[in-house]
Structure formats: structure tokens, C-alpha cells
Amino acid sequence: MSDSTGSNPVPRGWKRRGPHFTDRIAASSTSQPGGQGDDRGRWPVEPGRYRLVASLACPWAHRSIIVRRLLGLEGAISLGIVDPIQDSRSWRFTLDRDGIDPELGSHFLAEHYLARDPEDDGGVSVPAVVDVPSRLLVTNDYPQITLDLSTEWTAYHRPGAPDLYPEAWRDEIDDVAEKIYLDVNNGVYRAGFADSQEKYDTAFGILFERLDWLSDRLSERRYLVGDHITEADVRLFTTLVRFDAVYHGHFKTNRNKITEDRVLWAYVRDLFQTPGFGDTVNFDHIKHHYYRVHTQLNPSGIVPDGPDLSGWLTPHGRESLGGSPFGDGRAPTAATDLASYHLAPLAVPVDGEPQAARPRG
């Protein structure tokens, strides 16, 4: 299949906001330990200092959860999980006791956005990295967060961690990831939130042309780039794993399900069964978020019971294509910091409005 999808017109009915806090945590920071960003917005790499705030429902945040786990950074960067149900105050910590994040001491992620910039009105998004001592938001730059986990935190990677962004493959990873972002990650949203038939039709066509291109590419190779998992696979997985449960019906991307594409279904099952991927997926959070938050698309708020999830652990057969998930490394140990998050606390209300977080003590 020719690679012509990227040249097609882009629907204008829906547009993703780019990250508006783009500081980085970088080994090259000239700030002293405990300091904030240097004159180039680089904060020092310090284990135990930062908290990654993410949602198990959000595909953009899910990337950072997967990468953190694959690299074994659980002991260096803590993880806070927000309620999948947003209200007018955006992301809430209502999964935690008393609705308060235990490390940040806040009810709402917005508190840390306001602490960083009280005048900002660019929205509150996940993933977000917060500096625990100052309680300031550091970054919500979701594409860069995962790349920096791979390249700037190497001193704290676990033994046997994979190289998710090998220097020799970066141009190809960047190229493939850009196509995936424009046409698949973003493409499902452009179809789902299209405000005209024409825009929907265009988005729908671009999406499935790219999925066909990916299916063709993956028919003879186990991973998107090289012979092991890379950043490109992480970025594709978070959309594919949500496709049948949400996007196929909720966003009307219904030419076919992923389970009906032999190659892509085997590929995403292969990743799902790889430690660091499937054990970070929570279909309850995913479905409750999309079907209860997007009231313009689902006014009833009814959450579907399906689809059947039993097929995710069936044999995929992709070992025959060669390669190894972790290259010369090995799998991470069992996840421990996601097990306590479930749907039961969703009914716990939190009163009040977000206020700018202040440094503790």
C-alpha cells in the first residue's frame, strides 16, 4: 500500500490542544538539586522528587504509565491515578482516601496548574508531572514526557530495561509515530467529534487507510520499528486497545473492529500479553470515562457491558516473525501500584473549587 494518507485534508471540526507547559526534566539541567527549571526550562533529574499524574482511561496518559513501567522507574517517579470521571473541575483524586492525593495533598489536578500559572486557561490535561516539594506543575508535554523517561532517566532504569528510543532508529520511529499520531491517535477523535458529515467522512477515510497501512507493515514484522518494542509501538497500542471497546461505536469508526483485522488483532494481543502493557489496561476506567464524560455523544450516560474481553489472552502466534519484546533485556517485574484503583470510590463527592496549590510546610 502506498503511503499517501498523510497528504489527505485534515477535518477541522475537532482539534487537539497542544501541551502548554513544556518544561522538561533533563540530565543536562544546570539547576542545582532541589532547584526548579533553568533558563531553558530544564528541571534536574532527581529520583523521589516528581509525581506522574495520569488516567487509566486516557490514551495519551496511558503511554507514560506503560513507559514508566517498562523502564522500571516506579521507585524513581511516583504515580497518581485520577478518577476517570471528570466534572467541571476536570481531573479529580477521588480514587484516593478522602479524595486527596496522598503525596500531593490535593483534591484536583487543577490546583497544580493554577500554582504554576494562576492566569492559565489552557485546560487541565493528563499526563502531568508535578514537583512534589513545590507542588508546581512541571510539564504536561505528553509526547516529550515518554521520550525523556527513555533518554534522561537512564541512570535509574531497571536492569534489563529495553531501549525504547534507540538512537540509530530515531528517525524511523519519529516518522512512524507522526503518522500514527495524525491519522490514528488523533484520527479517532477527529471522526468522533466531527461537526459535519463531510469532516466525519474525511476523518474516517484517513483513519482506515492508515490502519490498512499499519496492518500491511506489521504483516511481516513483529514490531513497528526494529526487532523489539519501541516508543512507536507504545503510541499505537494505546489507541488499538481502546478501539473495539470505545472508538468503534462511540466515535463511529465502524468499518471494522480491530478483532476483525487478523494482523492488527494479533499484534495488539502480542503487546497486551507483554508485561507492562496489558497489566496497565483498565477497561472499566476506559469505558466509564468515554461513555459518561462525553455527554454530547452519549447523552444517556449508559455504559455498554461489552465487548467480550476473553480473546485478549488467546495465542497470537507472532513469535514466528522473530524479534524479542525487550531486545537483549528482560521483562519488568509485576506491577504493584495500579492494583488498588477500581471503580468503587467514584461515588465519593468532593466539594469546593480548585485553588492554587502552595508548597507544604
Image (cartoon, rainbow, N blue to C red):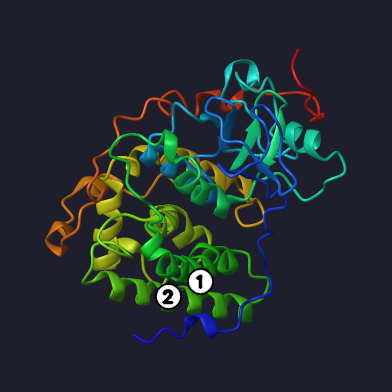
Q: Amino acid at mark 2?
A: Arg
Q: Which mark is residue 183?
A: 1
Residue at (42, 79) in percent of width and height: 209
Q: Please, is residue 301 above or below residue 177 in the view?
A: above
Asked if residue 82 can be seen in this view, the reply is: no
Q: Position of residue 85 (x, y in %)?
A: 61, 38
Q: Position of residue 24 (x, y in %)?
A: 63, 46
Residue at (80, 36) in percent of width and height: 114
Q: Is residue 232 left or right of residue 353?
A: left
Q: Position of residue 162 (x, y in %)?
A: 32, 46
Residue at (12, 61) in percent of width and height: 320
Q: Which comes before the other along the chain, label 1 or label 2? A: 1
Residue at disc 2, secondary structure = helix
Q: Which mark is residue 210?
A: 2
User: Of 32 and 76, which appears nearest the observer?
Assistant: 32
Residue at (24, 51) in percent of width and height: 327
- Asked whether the residues under the numbered discs 1 and 2 touch, taking CB atoms below 8 Å apart as contact, a structural biologist would say yes
Q: Can you tell which quarter of the image residue 10 is in?
A: bottom right
Q: Can you tell which quarter of the image residue 37 is in?
A: top right
Mark 1 closeness class: few <14, some 14–19, many ≥20 residues within 10 Å: many
Q: Please, is residue 221 above or below residue 83 in the view?
A: below
Q: Quadrant of the C terminus?
A: top right
Q: Amino acid at mark 1?
A: Asp
Estimate the spatial distance between the alpha carbons at disc 1 and disc 2, rounded to whole Å.
6 Å
Q: Please, is residue 114 above or below residue 266 in the view?
A: above
Q: Which mark is residue 305?
A: none
